[in-house]
Image: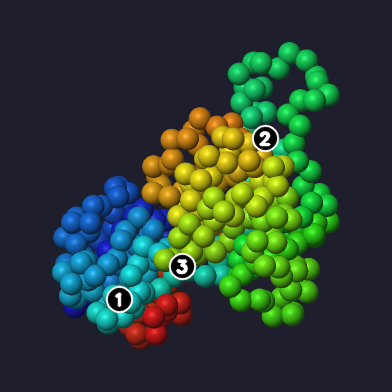
């Protein structure tokens, strides 16, 4: 008898076709986000699941879904999964590293450029029919070229962001919990500095760390207070890493010049203050969303699911 799996959110048809010979597949192609109770109901008789950051896999769910052996996240981040609880229940958890670094770094750069050059404000102005004459002092922005870029987290994505900075002839500073190997620093032309120094010196701070208990609000009022008034903050990593209330306050009072945000605490709800501000570029968690990359992510999760439930050895196992 085939094992049963659930694909928790809409995926490409090719991904379902790939799973079909291996499993009895139930797929949520209507793309409704299930409540915790609905998810338990669906997973109670399943051997495996493909999940996304909208599905919480925790102790409560695992207690009530005893057949579950594999949870394969369609994301590199996995803060929706309680890894310790998975290990305690003998459930394999996987993610999708390696396929989205370039695409996510590209989007961080889109936010950097849009925020620095106030593209959202300028676009809204033209669209609203307000453009009546050329002005010398119109939408004065921040130069990206030759600026100091401060990268929080020189992991896979942070490294790509750093390498892209060479084209803009920038000074690249980074902070991480561990200093990177010399070969990585030299390939990225990045200099390790203490966190406080990075916030003080950078013209652009861009965040590329995962969300965890340790990184919760690790960028809050004290860090933002160190930033230059002309500086901007970019977050294409995870909501909750930044204290959004503190950021709204800093943007409102002009303590910093702007922010570019793809992720939010409690998303898809966002702090209402962001919507009222013009000096913030907002996007709905789409940094990895190119056609090719989202396909690769979903396919990688499917490959992990097949490997987990056949060999017990998926390529991207998070809790060996
Ligand atoms: C997306 O946010 C991911 O973690 O892959």
Please indicate, yes or no, whether residue 17 appears anywhere in the rendered image.
no
Residue visible at 16% across and 69% down in the picture: 64
- Residue 228: x and y in percent read 70, 47
What secondary structure is found at the residue carrying circle 1? Answer: helix
Q: Residues within 10 Å of mark 3 (few under 14, many from 20)?
A: few
Q: Looking at this view, is 240 or 102 the one in front?
A: 240
Q: Can you see residue 319?
A: yes
Which percent across, then down, holds residue 222? 57, 54
Q: Quadrant of the C terminus?
A: bottom left
* N-term-proximal mark, 2 vs 3: 2
Front of the two marks 2 and 3? 3
Residue at the (30%, 76%) spot, across then down: 86
Residue 212: give x, y in percent of width and height: 44, 66
How many residues crowd around disc 1 within 10 Å: few (fewer than 14), some, or many (20 or more)? many
Q: Is residue 14 left or right of residue 167?
A: left
Count of numbered tags? 3
Mark 2 to mark 3: distance in Å? 34 Å
Question: In this figure, which residue is indicated by the disc labeled 1?
Answer: 86
The label shown at residue 214 is 3
Q: Quadrant of the N terminus?
A: bottom left
Q: Earlier in the sequence, mark 1 or mark 3?
A: 1
> Residue 202 falls in which quadrant of the image?
bottom right
Determine the CA span between mark 1 and mark 2: 44 Å
């Amino acid at each position: 008898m085939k094992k049963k799996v659930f694909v928790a959110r809409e995926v490409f048809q090719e991904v379902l076709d790939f799973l079909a010979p291996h499993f009895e597949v139930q797929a949520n192609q209507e793309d409704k986000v299930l409540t915790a109770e609905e998810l338990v109901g669906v997973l109670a008789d399943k051997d495996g699941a493909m999940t996304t950051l909208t599905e919480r896999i925790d102790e409560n769910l695992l207690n009530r879904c005893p057949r579950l052996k594999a949870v394969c996240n369609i994301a590199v981040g996995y803060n929706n999964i309680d890894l310790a609880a998975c290990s305690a229940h003998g459930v394999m958890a996987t993610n999708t590293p390696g396929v989205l670094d370039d695409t996510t770094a590209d989007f961080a750069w889109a936010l950097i450029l849009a925020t620095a050059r106030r593209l959202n404000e300028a676009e809204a102005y033209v669209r609203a029919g307000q453009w009546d004459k050329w002005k010398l002092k119109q939408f004065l922005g921040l130069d990206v070229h030759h600026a100091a870029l401060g990268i929080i987290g020189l992991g896979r994505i942070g490294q790509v962001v750093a390498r892209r900075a060479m084209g803009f002839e920038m000074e690249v500073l980074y902070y991480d919990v561990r200093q990177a190997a010399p070969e990585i620093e030299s390939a990225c032309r990045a200099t390790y500095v203490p966190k406080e120094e990075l916030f003080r010196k950078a013209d652009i701070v861009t965040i590329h760390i995962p969300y965890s208990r340790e990184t919760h609000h690790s960028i809050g009022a004290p860090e933002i207070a160190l930033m230059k008034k002309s500086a901007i903050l970019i977050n294409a990593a995870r909501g909750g890493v930044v204290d959004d209330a503190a950021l709204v306050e800093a943007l409102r009072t002009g303590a910093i010049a702007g922010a570019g945000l793809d992720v939010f605490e409690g998303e898809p709800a966002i702090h209402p203050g962001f919507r009222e501000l013009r000096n913030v570029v907002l996007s709905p968690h789409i940094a990895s969303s190119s056609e090719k990359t989202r396909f690769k992510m979903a396919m990688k999760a499917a490959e992990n699911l097949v490997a987990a439930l056949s060999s017990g050895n998926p390529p991207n196992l998070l809790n060996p």
